[in-house]
Image (cartoon, rainbow, N blue to C red):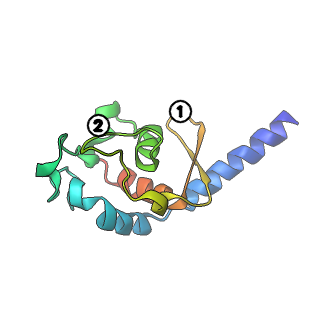
Amino acid sequence: MKNLILGVALSICAGAAAAQDVENGAQIYARHCATCHGADAQGGGPMAPVLVLQPPDLTALSARNDGVFPMTRVVMRIDGRDPLVSHGSPMPIYGDFFVGDDLSLRTESGQPILTSPAVADLVAFLQGLQD
């Protein structure tokens, strides 16, 4: 029975990862993230000068994590479970936009993490930007 449950859970995780839409993630990034993180995702967006903490270079997330994309940290920062106070409010500041029917992604440790389709697409886009 445990093997059946594990197999179903792994299938769900694998299916969700395949369902990520990088192109939609790029559009979400351009609309909601580039203002602070820059069009090139390297941290120099037009709002960056007014922020207390400068936005990080999102193309170097893996490089700063020993070559492994930090899926868990990225998902949790975007969906608000790991708030980052950079300009007086936690990220994200878009509220319900990033809320939706959860799907499961596989983290760098192999464990599943639930998040909305919009966050999954955005994370897929960011993962593709890594140096």
* Residue 41: quadrant of the picture: bottom left
* Mark 1–mark 2 CB contact (< 8 Å): no
Q: Residue at x 20, y 57 (%)?
A: 38
What residue sits right under mark 1 in the picture? 109
| CA–CA distance in space, label 1 to label 2 | 17 Å
What residue sits right under mark 2 in the picture? 63
Q: Can you tell which mark lies on residue 117?
A: none
Q: Is 14 left or right of 35, judged from the image as shown? A: right
Extreme front residue here? 88
The reply to whether residue 40 is visible in this rendering is: no
Q: Closer to the camera, 55 or 3?
A: 55
| Image coordinates for residue 58, horizontal then vertical, percent | 28, 47
Q: Closer to the camera, 36 or 125?
A: 36
Q: Closer to the camera, 104 or 19?
A: 104
Q: For the residue labelled by badge 1, is the local secondary structure a helix, a strand or a loop?
A: loop
Three-letter amino acid code at the position of disc 1: Ser
The image shows residue 118, relative to residue 104, as above or below, that is below
Three-letter amino acid code at the position of disc 2: Ala
